[in-house]
Amino acid sequence: MPTPRFLARRYLAGLVQARLEAESFPRLQMTLLVVLTGGAGLLASFVLLRLGVDSMAVRYPLAVTVAYGVFLLLLWLWLRTKAEDYSEVELPEPSGDGLGGAKGAFDAPGDAAESSAIGDAASALSGADELTMPLFIVTALAAMAVASFYVVYIAPTLFAELLVDGALSYVLYRRLRQAERQHWLSTAVKHTAWPFAVAAILLALIGLALSSAAPGAHTLGEVLHPQASADR
């Protein structure tokens, strides 16, 4: 059963989320962060290749790890830019339980989606042949697209909780001192670690599949155009 401290925190996040959605476009902002993160992942893959990390099964998940670090940095920058705008959030006086009758924020899905996606991808890889390989790659890429969409979808809740747990913690919690306190990084990782973990594992599987289909290839371009790679 949720504790009063947890529910009070949810109440604060709900107030901030309502203001975010009324005054800005949190999902559009998150879309921009996801695009920048994807660009960072592509750049990381390119740099790793230049550094001699030829295996796609190793390089791709490493690139995702770098991209996730960039994503967390972007969230920190977003938090720094928004802190002053929300430093004067007006809160109604809390009721006896500190909740003010507010409803809880969005509950993120559990890890069932993660384990299901990984299991399906692994099964597809084990029986891959010339016909199933393209289907497996398309399915894996679609799963990563869904993971990206998930991060965009939860943007209002995630941004609100980051503001509550980060820059606004003192301003807000002094009004509801019994609220549960968390570090903003813990909140960010809790909401976003599993989509990036899924992406890393799926890209590792894709790297294995591509290496199996085109031994000696180090990039997707070499897999798709082996003759051009051989001529260089």
Image (cartoon, rainbow, N blue to C red):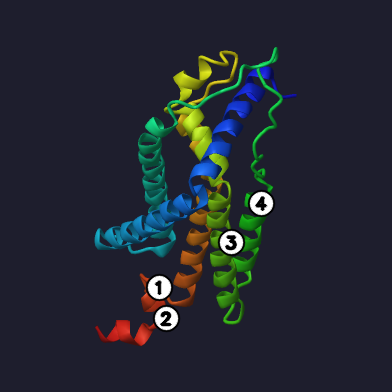
* First in sequence: mark 1 vs mark 3: 3
SS at badge 4: helix
* First in sequence: mark 4 vs mark 1: 4
Q: CA distance from mark 3 to mark 4?
A: 10 Å
- Residue toward you, 72 or 60: 72
- Residue toward you, 111 or 77: 77
In the image, what residue occupies the spot 36% across and 59% down?
39
Q: Which residue is mark 3?
A: 143
In which quadrant of the rendered image does the C terminus lie? Answer: bottom left
* First in sequence: mark 4 vs mark 2: 4
| Residue 224 badge | 2
Structural crowding at the residue carrying mark 4, measured as other residues with C-alpha within 10 Å and reported as few (<14), some (14–19) or many (≥20): some
Structural crowding at the residue carrying mark 2, measured as other residues with C-alpha within 10 Å and reported as few (<14), some (14–19) or many (≥20): few
Question: What amino acid does circle 3 point to?
Answer: Ala
Label 1 close to label 3 by CB (< 8 Å): no
Q: Which residue is mark 1?
A: 220
| Residue 113 badge | 4
Image spot of residue 67 (x, y percent): 39, 51
Question: What amino acid does circle 4 point to?
Answer: Ala
Label 3 close to label 4 by CB (< 8 Å): no
The residue mark sitting in front, 4 or 2, is 4
Label 2 close to label 1 by CB (< 8 Å): yes
Q: Quadrant of residue 77?
A: top left
- Residue toward you, 67 or 167: 167
Q: CA distance from mark 4 to mark 2?
A: 31 Å
* First in sequence: mark 3 vs mark 4: 4
SS at badge 1: helix
